[in-house]
Image: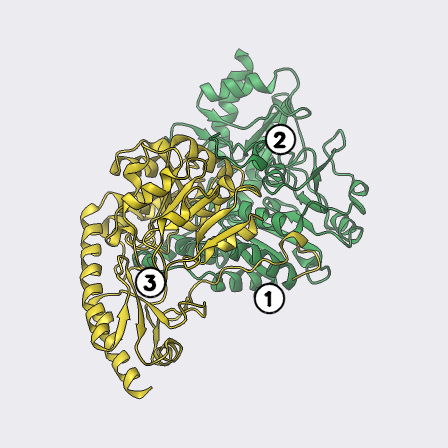
Chain colours: A yellow, B green
Amino acid sequence: MSRFFSGELNTLAPYTPGEQPQDKKYLKLNTNESPFAPGNEVIKALNTSQAELLRLYPDPECTMLRKAAAKRVSLNEENVTAGNGSDENLAFAIRAFCSKDKPLAFPDITYGFYSVWAKLFEIPARQIPLTDDFRIKIEDYFNLNCTIVIANPNAPTGISLSVDKIEKIIVNNPDGVIIVDEAYVDFGAQSCVPLINKYDNLLVVQTFSKSRSLAGARLGLAFGSKELIADINRVRYSFNPYNINRLTLLAGQAALNDEEYFKYCIREICKTREWTANELKKLGFTLTQSETNFLFAKHGEKHSRDIYRFLREKGVLVRRWDTPGIEDYLRITVGTTEDMKKFIYILKSCLEEL
Amino acid sequence: MSRFFSGELNTLAPYTPGEQPQDKKYLKLNTNESPFAPGNEVIKALNTSQAELLRLYPDPECTMLRKAAAKRVSLNEENVTAGNGSDENLAFAIRAFCSKDKPLAFPDITYGFYSVWAKLFEIPARQIPLTDDFRIKIEDYFNLNCTIVIANPNAPTGISLSVDKIEKIIVNNPDGVIIVDEAYVDFGAQSCVPLINKYDNLLVVQTFSKSRSLAGARLGLAFGSKELIADINRVRYSFNPYNINRLTLLAGQAALNDEEYFKYCIREICKTREWTANELKKLGFTLTQSETNFLFAKHGEKHSRDIYRFLREKGVLVRRWDTPGIEDYLRITVGTTEDMKKFIYILKSCLEEL
């Protein structure tokens, strides 16, 4: 830290993203990317003539993208805004809807970034323990007088809540915004987007990084009432109005228009997830019920730290945390069938040698 | 504003960017974009195989880009960080180096976003008047106990300060960071980057939006001591670690490696600027001494508001503000020679008819 760093922030502990090796020697199952390239529609959208237009600023209102996104879920474009990745939308929403008197509440085991944003914006955080089997007890979230953020499905557990249960949380917090982070929703859980016309305190955040194969393009959407979206845009226009670049806007729009490829990728990933889960069980792992593109698994005998290290040496990256409660677990991204066959093969040798 | 919007922010007045019409019917001289497409090296860098890699997250450390940027100015990569446009770097820097006790100081006439960020981060702002001929009196900036941001050349006046004078401000503020915003520096002013090894309180911010024809890709760089850059990265990793997408990283790197095209574009724009300035003088305008890719001009008789409106009706966008002190002025981006011939032709008819 330099002697100039703001004293107000000197306990800031930045988020640690999963390792992103820039060479290609790893089987990369650590950051929940899609194993499939973006579809042909996306590749076509990024043609040379579009690159030439990079001399011009992008549309700060992201009009075409918002239109495509709103149409797909039968909302109006005023119900949608776009972020430089879901992370940016989450940051804007937390800044907009929390304050010293309106803390941010979230499960104690969830996406690690929520607590970092609270710290950055000097907002009190209230962490609510999951049950022993990693479930959210919805009654714990009633009448909190907080802004609440729930990842559904939750990360890194992969477990989802039904829309009915989330609706109970919404109804029982009339004075707080409920942010539902649906980064992984496309892999089997139910979306809360259909509730948006019913509740003025619901914000749903989605990303193009997982089910739409565009982690490298950085694009997320937020859906909510016209008023909540206008609030987020107030923060956005006070921070970085041109937050989405031209090529990402085009890629996102093209991805939204190719429903067939989107469904194909999801189908394949879900199939491979079930195959991999079964193989892991045969090898002595217990797993949570994942409705995401990753598996959360614990071995009966070997410690995750040792497995992690062994896999890494053999060129396979998965993710683990030293966080109490989940330190025995590995989070494994579902790749292609070939990726996962290779993974299981290497894992077998790992368990034999450890 | 929804009933959920943070009370702390309820006086927030977001920045208003220049109009970005999405159709192509305007001669667009209002937001200081380059009239030239990105070079062939950039177009080549964005090839199909790169689009396929969009499924993977970008390198959060922006290693290759930072290496290329550091090499060009004979610094180390630890002296550079990258933002989603210069705006993001400026926002991060203001968050990192200001606080309730360390206000942000800047000229009263300058880039309109500085005051917006101060408000967003709840940091006091101290605005220091320019002289009547729009100049910065450097003594006004000595020993302020503030973080200071100076656009050099200044916007929208186009007037630059010499490095000698900025160095005096740096030396006379040993306890504050001096942020020099060099968005327009390539069009004729001197850069402060060579001072970075000499002062630990200097941060220089540059952009790819103007001289490198990449406004639509969103990319900015910040140069400073290793410690200042680490501080900005602390904020960046607490806000959005994957802030630069893959294609923009590639475009930026390719642009840095094509010095010849970069110099060609600047030469052309400076030549066209001088031609346009002369034509404007013949038409009765007075101009500031611009060292940017825009001209700041006031007519002797007709009011800028009327000229602005007339030009707009004829399909020409320029920029003006109702801000006291500059309400008589127009800011005109320098386009291609053909653009500016057309502009002068339409302007002539405007002055005849008004």
User: Which residue position holds label 3?
Assistant: A133
Amino acid under disc 3: Asp
Residue B75 can be seen, yes or no: yes
Residue A263's place in the image compared with B344, above or below, is below
Q: Is residue B108 above or below residue A3?
A: above
Q: Nearer the viewer, mark 2 or mark 1?
A: 1
Q: Secondary structure at mark 2?
A: strand
Chain of the residue that carries numbered disc 3 in the rendered image:
A
Q: Which mark is residue B338?
A: none
The answer as to whether the residues below labels 3 and 1 share one chain is: no
Q: Is residue B239 visible?
A: no
Residue A310 percent coordinates (x, y): 36, 81
At label 2, counting other C-alpha atoms closer than 10 Å, the crowd grade (few under 14, some 14-19, many 20 or more) is many
Q: Which mark is residue B296?
A: 2
Instruction: Give the residue at x 76% y 29%.
Output: B132
Q: Position of residue A244 (x, y in %)?
A: 42, 44
Image position of A17 (left or right of B142): left
The lab-note entry on whether marks 2 and 1 share a chain reads yes
Q: How many marks?
A: 3
Q: Is residue A85 left or right of residue B104?
A: left
Q: Nearer the viewer, residue A288 or A96?
A: A288
Inter-mark Cα distance, 3 to 1:
49 Å
Of pointers 2 and 1, the one earlier in the residue sequence = 1
State the residue at coordinates (22%, 50%): A262
For badge 1, the amino acid type reads Asn
The amino acid type found where label 2 is placed reads: Phe
Q: Residue furthest front?
A: A139
The residue tagged 1 is B76
How far separated are the C-alphas under marks 2 and 1?
A: 37 Å
Q: For mark 1, does the 10 Å Cα neighbourhood hold few (<14), some (14 to 19), or many (20 or more) residues?
A: some
Depth check, front residue: B145 or B305: B145
